[in-house]
């Protein structure tokens, strides 16, 4: 039996693409392995959003060269955002002769044909499409979980935040037909899935490109009617498109989880403007206020970039101040990474590395302290946990997520994996809650 492995870099969108790719590989007769040395087919599904993601892929491809020398029949493939644009793509295409198959984010449906071509000719195959074709739009996936699932609702991004390469890699925003999404969710519910996460670069603008446009809250409304799906999540949301209608839907629809990931990126109006984010800090804080008012107990998480070109100490202090006011429950903090081809990479006044590292450290210290304070406040409360698996270090401990997306550890049996369990919280760190089943 031939074996395959997919190494996925980057976001949930990529993880879900890997699930789609798995379907085709298994259809072609491969079975999954966790071990690189055992694999006959190795795929790197790449990310381009920051430079270090690209470095990791180039490093891994360097290592794979040796593996291929030992095992000449090994097939090495590279896919994902990094293959859509940029210098690293050209380097891999032109110089990494041990790579057999390269395909882009818009060629996942073409993979059966790409494999055929490779097997018939034995020659390297390159397939990179610029435009997304949703013509067939069938969902064929081998999912990584039996109880929670990703559903793509839109591809691409039209926002052109000045630091971001995604619109160049994933292209213009295009929405899937609501009927397809609802059907996919219904089938998942019938199969016993409890949680779905709707994926798009900016789910809040879902529906604009449809022949019969509908809005994101209307889609949520339909999905909320499906029996058995207890939890509906979505990501990511752009603050500029977060409507009152969506906030209202969040408060009203019982299956929609009390968690909102709302990337702020910076707390300085001057920087937000240069980032082309199209909202001010006051407008952002107003959204935070409305969400907390409409959805009691909601957890808010965010993304923040430190060291955007021209960021002064005063700008940074504005970010720190916003973080304190918003009291985020979780977040991702990134050091700005210039992406060739984006407007920000051409801006002068790139901030020196030492200053950026110092600000980064101050920011995470502040954020982690807030997470800890907020998590401690949950001690004594009871939270519903969807059990994901056992802890990596102790199989007598289960791990799972609350509706608010908090990670919880508690003692229990592996038979509880996939179940919804009420857990009383007994301890907290900045990133995890501990508890016991009630
Ligand atoms: N540098 C650093 N972080 C970035 N992000 C996007 N582009 C860059 C970049 N060039 C971050 C943003 C976004 C998250 C997915 O990645 O915060 O929300
Ligand atoms: Fe990038 Fe901005 Fe689009 Fe997010 S909304 S993918 S940060 S361009």
Image (cartoon, helix red, strand yellow):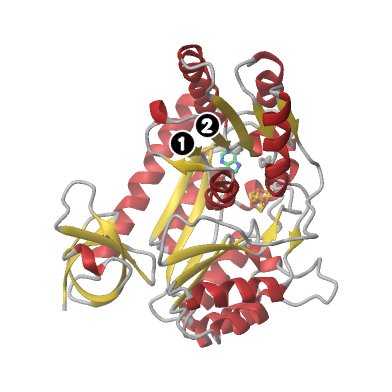
Q: Residue at x 17, y 53 (%)?
A: 395
Decide if residue 128 is on the left or right side of residue 325.
right
Report whether residue 309 is seen.
no
Location of residue 415 by image quarter: bottom left
Marks 1 and 2: in contact by CB < 8 Å? yes
Q: Please name the residue that numbered disc 2 is placed on.
A: 41
Q: Residues within 10 Å of mark 1 (few under 14, many from 20)?
A: some
Q: Residue at x 55, y 22 (%)?
A: 58
Report whether residue 231 is seen.
yes
* Real-space CA distance between mark 2 and mark 1, rounded to the nearest whole angstrom: 6 Å
Location of residue 331 by image quarter: bottom left
Secondary structure type for disc 1: strand
Name the quarter where the N terminus is drawn.
Answer: top left
Q: Position of residue 339 (x, y in %)?
A: 66, 32
* Residue furthest right in the image: 211
* Relative to 207, residue 136 above or below: above
Labels 2 and 1: the sequence-earlier one: 1
Decide if residue 243 is on the left or right side of residue 293.
right
Q: Residues within 10 Å of mark 2 (few under 14, many from 20)?
A: many
Decide if residue 422 is on the left or right side of residue 262.
left
Q: Nearer the viewer, residue 417 or 216?
A: 417
Q: Residue at x 38, y 38 (%)?
A: 34
Q: Is mark 1 within 8 Å of ligand 1?
A: no
* Relative to 262, residue 314 above or below: above
Q: Position of residue 122 (x, y in %)?
A: 69, 23
Q: Please name the residue that numbered disc 1 is placed on.
A: 3
């Amino acid at each position: 039996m031939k074996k395959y492995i997919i190494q996925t870099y980057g976001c949930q969108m990529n993880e879900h693409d890997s699930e789609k790719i798995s379907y085709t590989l298994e259809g072609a007769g491969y079975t999954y392995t966790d071990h690189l040395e055992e694999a006959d087919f190795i795929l790197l599904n790449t990310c381009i959003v920051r430079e270090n993601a690209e470095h990791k892929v180039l490093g891994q491809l360097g290592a794979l060269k040796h593996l291929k020398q030992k095992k000449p029949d090994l097939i090495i493939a590279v896919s994902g955002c990094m293959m859509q644009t940029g210098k690293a793509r050209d380097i891999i295409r032109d110089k990494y002769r041990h790579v057999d198959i390269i395909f882009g984010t818009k060629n996942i449906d073409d993979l059966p044909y790409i494999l055929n071509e490779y097997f018939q000719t034995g020659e390297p195959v390159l397939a990179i499409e610029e435009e997304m074709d949703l013509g067939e739009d069938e969902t064929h996936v081998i999912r990584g979980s039996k109880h929670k699932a990703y559903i793509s609702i839109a591809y691409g991004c039209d926002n052109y935040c000045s630091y971001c390469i995604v619109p160049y890699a994933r292209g213009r925003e295009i929405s899937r037909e609501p009927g397809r999404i609802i059907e996919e969710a219904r089938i998942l519910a019938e199969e016993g899935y409890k949680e779905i996460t709707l994926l798009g670069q900016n789910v809040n603008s879902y529906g604009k490109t449809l022949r019969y446009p509908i809005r994101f809250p209307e889609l949520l409304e339909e999905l909320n009617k499906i029996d058995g799906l207890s939890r509906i999540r979505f990501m990511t949301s752009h603050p500029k498109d977060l409507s009152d209608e969506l906030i209202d839907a969040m408060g009203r629809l019982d299956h929609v989880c009390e968690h909102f990931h709302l990337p702020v990126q910076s707390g300085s109006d001057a920087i937000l403007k240069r980032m082309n984010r199209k909202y001010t800090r006051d407008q952002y804080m107003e959204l935070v206020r409305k969400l907390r008012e409409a959805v009691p107990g909601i957890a808010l998480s965010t993304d923040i970039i430190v060291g955007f070109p021209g960021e002064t100490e005063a700008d940074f202090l504005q970010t720190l101040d916003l973080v304190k006011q918003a009291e985020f429950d979780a977040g991702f903090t990134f050091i700005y990474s210039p992406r060739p081809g984006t407007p920000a990479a051409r801006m002068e006044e790139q901030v020196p590395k030492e200053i950026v590292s110092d600000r980064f450290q101050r920011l995470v210290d502040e954020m982690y302290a807030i997470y800890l304070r907020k998590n401690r406040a949950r001690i004594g409360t009871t939270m519903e946990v969807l059990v994901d698996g056992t802890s990596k270090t102790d199989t007598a401990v289960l791990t799972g997520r609350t509706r608010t997306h908090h990670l919880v550890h508690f003692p229990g049996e592996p038979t509880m994996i996939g179940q919804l369990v009420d857990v009383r919280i007994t301890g907290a760190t900045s990133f995890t809650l501990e508890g016991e089943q009630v």
